[in-house]
Amino acid sequence: MRAAQETFHQHLKRLRLKPTEQRDTIVRSFLETREQLSPEELHQRMKQSDPGIGFTAVYRTLKLLTACGLALEVAFRSGIARYEHRYNRRNHHHMVCTQCGGAVEFVSPEVDRLEKEIGRKYRYQPTRHTFQIYGLCEDCRRKSSRRVA
Amino acid sequence: MRAAQETFHQHLKRLRLKPTEQRDTIVRSFLETREQLSPEELHQRMKQSDPGIGFTAVYRTLKLLTACGLALEVAFRSGIARYEHRYNRRNHHHMVCTQCGGAVEFVSPEVDRLEKEIGRKYRYQPTRHTFQIYGLCEDCRRKSSRRVA
DNA sequence: ATTGCTGCAAACGATTTGCATGAGG
DNA sequence: CCTCATGCAAATCGTTTGCAGCAAT
């Protein structure tokens, strides 16, 4: 956590931006949360630590976090951005339930291998990828089959 | 193509909706196009076949096409929806250049295998997935290294 | 002092919806 | 006829930006 904050401050310094109370509050809130958050949710979550903080700061800080690699955008539904932090987190992916919106994480080294392999083949320099599986989770499957019966 | 239109009409019938001139025009235009299209682009493309068609019909028809499995949403940049048709198309993925926005297609049977495997493991019933690789294409890499030199 | 930061509200772009009119069964 | 579809314009949603005042160097 210390280290991540350090990374963030380095990034600010590089861009000649200023470390401020609000930015630190937002970053701390963000790093503390294990799940993915929409800007909206993060903003809500911060009402406790500092009720005065506005959307603007949240959006701008998430952008900074993404730029320095501490946050990753994972778009589950198009039109709503979601972010998750990259600090102390294994490289993983999500399987998302299209009914209830819940998600489970899974790890698959093969996907990283594929990224490199395909990149080489088409002469791209790959920097990142998205991989998400959509479907019905067990609970929702049960519920929907019950509805039919 | 015939078959795809048939699928679409079946879907309309199921929902007690009406097959109309405009819907058919939009579907035809969409199926004829091999690349992914944003609703905006599809709307433009139809100015030729029927200049009177509005955004609304395009958006609504794309939604219907997605619902009956003929269209797939592939979100390259968040905030702009893009659709590609699933008719007579191998299951493929995209590698997208973050600089110029260009994309190449690639096919990887492993990804489909992974979908099933992970689904089984976590007791999901997977229906689809997204997999995209982002990076720099050869041209853009050359250009950006030249700029440094 | 200077430069950048903030929250607010207005602006924005993509998508959706309400409504009066027009087309399909 | 009755229902649904259409195009338009207005509404909406998430996100971005301009601005006047505040805070950090």
Image (spheres, coloured by chain):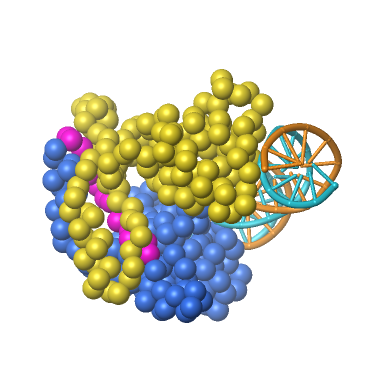
Chain colours: A blue, B yellow, C orange, D cyan
Query: At x 42% / y 59%, what residue is drawn?
Result: A76
Observer-nearest of C22 and B128:
C22
Query: At x 38% / y 73%, what residue is drawn?
Result: A137
Horizontal and vertical percent for residue B63? 53, 48
Kindly report the secondary structure that dominates the magenta region of the rendered protein.
strand
Q: Is C4 situated above or below A97?
A: above
Q: Is B73 situated above or below B97?
A: below
Q: Is A88 situated above or below B27?
A: below
Quadrant where the N terminus of chain B sits is top left
Observer-nearest of A67 and B115:
B115
Horizontal and vertical percent for residue A129? 28, 51
- Visible residue check, residue B63: no
Query: At x 47% / y 50%, what residue is drawn?
Result: B68
Observer-nearest of A91 and B49:
B49
Taking the image as shown, residue B5 lies to the left or right of residue A96, namely right
- Location of residue A64 by image quarter: bottom left
- Tell me, yes or no, whether the highlighted magenta stretch contains residue A130: yes
Q: Residue furthest top?
A: B48
Quadrant where the C terminus of chain B sits is top left
Q: Is D12 situated above or below A26?
A: above
Taking the image as shown, residue A85 lies to the left or right of residue A115, namely right
Query: At x 15% / y 47%, what residue is drawn?
Result: A116
- Tell me, yes or no, whether the highlighted magenta stretch contains residue B26: no
Observer-nearest of D10 and A137:
A137
Residues drawn in magenta: A122-135
- Visible residue check, residue B27: yes
Number of on-image labels = 0
- Location of residue A9 by image quarter: bottom left
Horizontal and vertical percent for residue B136? 26, 37
- Location of residue B85 by image quarter: top left
Horizontal and vertical percent for residue B22? 61, 33
